[in-house]
Image (cartoon, grey):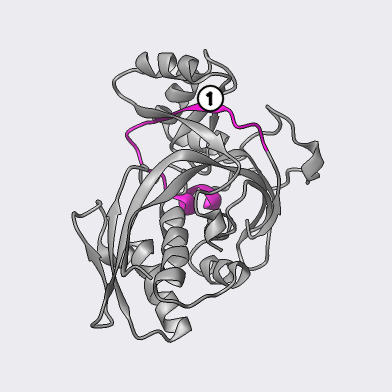
């Protein structure tokens, strides 16, 4: 077995819709959402460290090591599995932080999958996914590795296939706290539950979007601009928004017209995580 892995993908995700169906007594919200992966994301390098330490290597990705979900995931897996080896982790960050694209959760999932191999632990997917849930509600979908209809707090996953459309994803210069949006008193928390088979292209909405639009005019303006191209929506709790296209060339043409106050990229949807076959 190689003592290191280089350039492992941690893809971004989109919530094609996100309905808030209730709030539990413990304060967590119950959701229904549809996840798809994008062929765009972060990249991670892993190497075994014989001293048993878990350390971040390379350039600062823009947040402290104690907040890095890669490091948290590695240390949790090491603790729970009892392995003696350590790991050096280098993160090349492309997914915007605080954008609703699942970057931290995806990084954590790739870390769990990679170190499960590199350390020779050999856990099954379900066990890694359960561990990942301790790091964040979105981590299991990346470990499971299939586009999925999610329920509960996002941990009950039903794999499904969705159209692998092209997307223009655009981001305003603002990071949004998921905690703030879910705590908002004006948030709708009583969307009627749907069945997975109800899904079709353009179905549903994002219950978090009206709250974000009211509080963050940058997101409202971005959605208005994207709306000229089709059904523009926010992903997760924002701030990134997207619009689907049938062809990549059309999406790239729209990207070329993106106003300078936004950043963006074009990506294609994927029904399967690139590391799905590792488990």
Is residue 271 toward the left or the right of residue 108 in the image? right
Q: Is residue 1 above or below residue 182?
A: below
Q: Residue furthest front?
A: 1
Is residue 143 toward the left or the right of residue 174 in the image? right
Dot 1: element: strand
Q: Which picture quadrant has residue 79?
A: bottom left
| 168 falls in the magenta region | yes
Please give the name of the residue rendered at 48% of the width and 54% of the height, measured from the top-left corner.
Answer: 179
Q: Residue furthest left?
A: 59
Q: Quadrant of the N terminus?
A: bottom left
Rendered location of residue 37, percent (x, y)? 54, 42
Whether residue 194 can be seen here: no
Q: Nearer the viewer, residue 50 or 159?
A: 50
Rendered location of residue 177, percent (x, y)? 42, 49
Please give the name of the residue rendered at 60% of the width and 32% of the height, measured from the top-left corner.
Answer: 164
Q: Is residue 89 above or below residue 91?
A: below
Rendered location of residue 15, percent (x, y)? 58, 41
Q: Nearer the viewer, residue 193 or 270?
A: 270
Q: Quadrant of the C terminus?
A: bottom right
Please give the name of the residue rendered at 43% of the width and 15% of the height, measured from the top-left corner.
Answer: 254
- Pointer 1 local density, CA inside 10 Å: few below 14, some 14–19, many at least 20: many
All told, the count of numbered labels is: 1
Magenta span of residues: 162-183
- Residue hosting label 1: 243
Is residue 47 toward the left or the right of residue 59 in the image? right
Rendered location of residue 24, percent (x, y)? 68, 63
Is residue 66 toward the left or the right of residue 142 in the image? left
| 239 falls in the magenta region | no
Whether residue 73 can be seen here: yes
Please give the name of the residue rendered at 59% of the width and 22% of the height, measured from the top-left corner.
Answer: 231
């Amino acid at each position: 077995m190689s003592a290191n892995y280089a350039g492992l993908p941690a893809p971004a995700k989109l919530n094609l819709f996100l309905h808030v169906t209730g709030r539990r007594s413990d304060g967590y919200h119950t959701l229904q959402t549809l996840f798809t992966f994008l062929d765009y994301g972060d990249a991670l390098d892993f190497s075994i460290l014989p001293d048993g330490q878990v350390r971040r290597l390379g350039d600062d990705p823009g947040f402290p090591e104690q907040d890095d979900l890669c490091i948290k995931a590695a240390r949790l897996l090491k603790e729970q599995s009892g392995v003696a080896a350590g790991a050096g982790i280098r993160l090349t960050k492309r997914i915007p932080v605080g954008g609703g694209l699942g970057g931290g959760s995806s990084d954590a999932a790739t870390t769990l999958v990679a170190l499960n191999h590199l350390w020779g632990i050999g856990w099954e997917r379900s066990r890694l996914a359960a561990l990942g849930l301790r790091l964040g509600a979105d981590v299991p979908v990346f470990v499971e590795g299939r586009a999925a209809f999610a329920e509960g707090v996002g941990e009950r996953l039903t794999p499904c296939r969705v159209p692998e459309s092209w997307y223009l994803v655009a981001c305003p210069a603002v990071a949004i706290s998921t905690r703030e949006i879910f705590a908002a008193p004006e948030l709708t928390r009583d969307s009627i539950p749907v069945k997975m088979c109800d899904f079709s292209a353009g179905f549903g909405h994002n219950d978090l979007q009206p709250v974000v639009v009211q509080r963050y005019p940058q997101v409202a303006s971005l959605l208005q601009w994207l709306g000229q191209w089709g059904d523009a929506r926010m992903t997760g709790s924002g701030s990134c928004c997207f619009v689907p296209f049938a062809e990549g060339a059309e999406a790239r043409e729209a990207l070329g017209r993106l106003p300078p106050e936004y950043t963006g990229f074009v990506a294609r949807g994927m029904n399967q995580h690139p590391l799905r076959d590792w488990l």
